[in-house]
Image: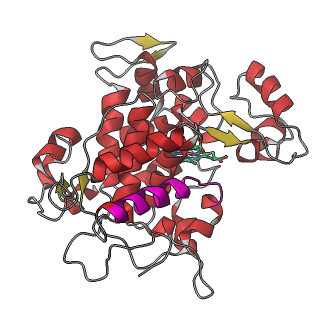
Amino acid sequence: MKCAKLMLTAAVLTLLGTSCLAVIVPLSSSFRVGFYNQTCPAAESIVRSTLISRFQSDIRLPARLIRLLFHECFVTGCDGSLLVTSTASNQAEKDAAPNLNVAGYDAVDAAKSALENACPGVVSCADIEVLLAREAVSLLGGPNITVPTGRLDARSSSASLAASTLPGLGTSVPGMIAAFAAKGFTTQDMVALLGAHTVGAAFCNSFSYRLYNFKGTNQSDPSMNSILLGKLRTVCPRSPVNPDPTVALDQGNNSINAFDSSFFRELLNGNGILEIDQAIAVHNQTAAIVAAYAANSTSGNSTAGNITVVPSLNFGSNFAQVFVKLSMLDVLTGGNSSATIRKNCAIIS
Ligand code: HEM
């Protein structure tokens, strides 16, 4: 359990629930809710207005920013290392294979330049990523989340580290549980985090192997709903087309931009787009959690099909808790000489 590495404020403690209470370390003055209140009071509102104004012309942006934060924090922590551009002597995280479709960097840059105008040299790129993703969740109808700030930016970024740390597309449920456990997440945390797939889309390239030749069988993935299979084969032909089309990760009606629990209900019907999403609906370590979120139950036992639902699980509040946990992975804070506040998020300074 990695909770011991986190610096928690009282406000964050309540968000995280009781599972980390045994390993709480004292308050940190350099990493807390409202860190910029004195040094850049408008910081959080500047980030929010940047997102809202760019959302008008790019409705896919919020989902991209949520994904960007996951790919940022899972590799060496929430330290801005994903934002760095490769140089002749260093291939940066951004250019690792699992990151090639990650997007939203332009919004980070826009927020950074607005913040540099308002309060030069104060707000880190790492905090901007966290605040943008938190605003994105809220903008799409998800929970309002309070996050601590005061992260610093890393001075390094490694493509090979990103490639070896981010779980691959065909990773099994136990493999995924182990990868998340290595970062301090429980199985329930992992399922809640995967619930981020309630918004956004995937390129055919990310799942078409499930349609035509699943695990070398020359057949489709048997766990996929047959109506969905027919639909996806039309959108994603066997021979790839250019540009590659995209498909909503949550197949619920008009749900691509709604942060809700419909994603989990779709999984119960075999309508998961990504292999891992469908797999968590049937694996014995995760199925009950998926069913609980699908029922969005807040109290009592209930059943979905023949799966007994775990009582008292609420996707919105669980996601808020685990988002905070994600945003606190291995943060660099004041006094760390290997950390900085970059002027330009793409260039290590
Ligand atoms: C467990 C491992 C995970 C895998 C294997 C995975 C994989 C993927 C893939 C393949 C896509 C589609 C990318 C594309 O085709 O462009 C995607 C999209 C997305 N992922 Fe994940 N993901 C994982 C976990 C997460 C987590 C933990 C989060 C956030 C907390 C997240 C948030 C998103 C979002 C919001 C999108 C939609 C992005 C967009 O619309 O551009 N994912 N993910």
Is residue 49 toward the left or the right of residue 106 in the image?
A: left
Which residue is more in the foreground, 193 or 143? 143
Tell me which residue sits at (82%, 24%) in the image: 230
Q: Is residue 178 visible?
A: no
View extreme (right): residue:
239
Note whether 81 is above or below 237 in the view shown: below
Query: Residue 116: image x %, image y %?
Result: 36, 65
View extreme (front): residue:
117
Tell me which residue sits at (65%, 63%) in the image: 97
Q: Is residue 129 visible?
A: yes
Q: Quadrant of residue 255?
A: top right
Tell me which residue sits at (20%, 57%) in the image: 36
Query: Residue 111: image x %, image y %?
Result: 42, 56
The quadrant of the picture occupied by the N terminus is bottom left
Q: Quadrant of residue 321?
A: top left
Q: Quadrant of ligand 1?
A: top right
Q: Main secondary structure of the magenta part?
A: helix
Write down the region rendered in magenta: 100-117
Residue 178 colored in magenta in the image? no
Query: Residue 153: image x %, image y %?
Result: 36, 71
Describe the colour scheme in one phrase. secondary structure
Query: Residue 115: image x %, image y %?
Result: 35, 60
Note whether 44 is above or below 182 in the view shown: above
